[in-house]
Image (cartoon, grey):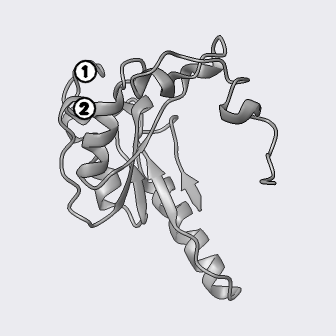
Amino acid sequence: MSESRSRSTRDPTRQYWVIAYITQYEHELGYEHHPIGMTFQYPPTDQVRANDALWASPAEWISPGFDDGPAPVDSRWYLDPPANDGTKVVLSDSDHYSPLFVDAIWAWKSLARGHNPILYDLGIVGGADPTQAALGGPPTSRSSLPGGHSATRCATPT
């Protein structure tokens, strides 16, 4: 899987070129095709049309952002995610519209509406595991996973 993204330009032309180039390169060399994605361009020229370039792109998967206001507060992508029409695989990244306020309800709404939710993991700040709180439990340390295993160790079943 490859991603084409650019936060330094508001023109998607370069991203479209990268996607086309990778696709052509893989084809010419006989490589298996890998899904190529494109992510939300920030800051957009026109907030209401912020995701149009994604939907119009040649990318197989996209990761949209907030498109209903000047800041990601109470974004529809957080409160009431639109249904996916099936034209693209949608990776719904909470960082793109509600980086600090995601919960299990958002994840279920996103999943039920045809998206693939991705949690912007703030656990790297302070060591807490935000998924536990989002699932209704208390935040726990990353070092106290079930079975006494740490996040950096791979357990082999016995």
Picture coordinates of residue 35, whole percent (x, y): 52, 68
Q: Name the residue rendered at 19%, 35% in the picture.
A: 48
83 sits to left or right of 151: left
Quadrant holding the C terminus:
bottom right
Quadrant assignment, res 22: bottom right
Q: Which residue is mark 1?
A: 70
Q: CA distance from mark 2 to mark 1?
A: 7 Å
- Residue 57: x and y, percent? 37, 61
Along the line of sight, the residue nearer the viewer: 3 or 10: 3
For marks 2 and 1, the one nearer the N-term is 2
> Which residue matches tag 2?
47
Q: Residue 147 has which mark?
A: none
| Residue 45 can be seen in this image | no
Expressed as whole percent of the image width and height from the top left, the position of residue 101 reads 36, 19
Residue contact at pointers 2 and 1, CB within 8 angstroms: yes
Instruction: State the residue in front, 108 or 95.
Output: 108
Q: Is residue 31 left or right of residue 34?
A: right
Q: What's the amino acid at mark 1?
A: Pro
Write down the quadrant of residue 47 in the picture: top left
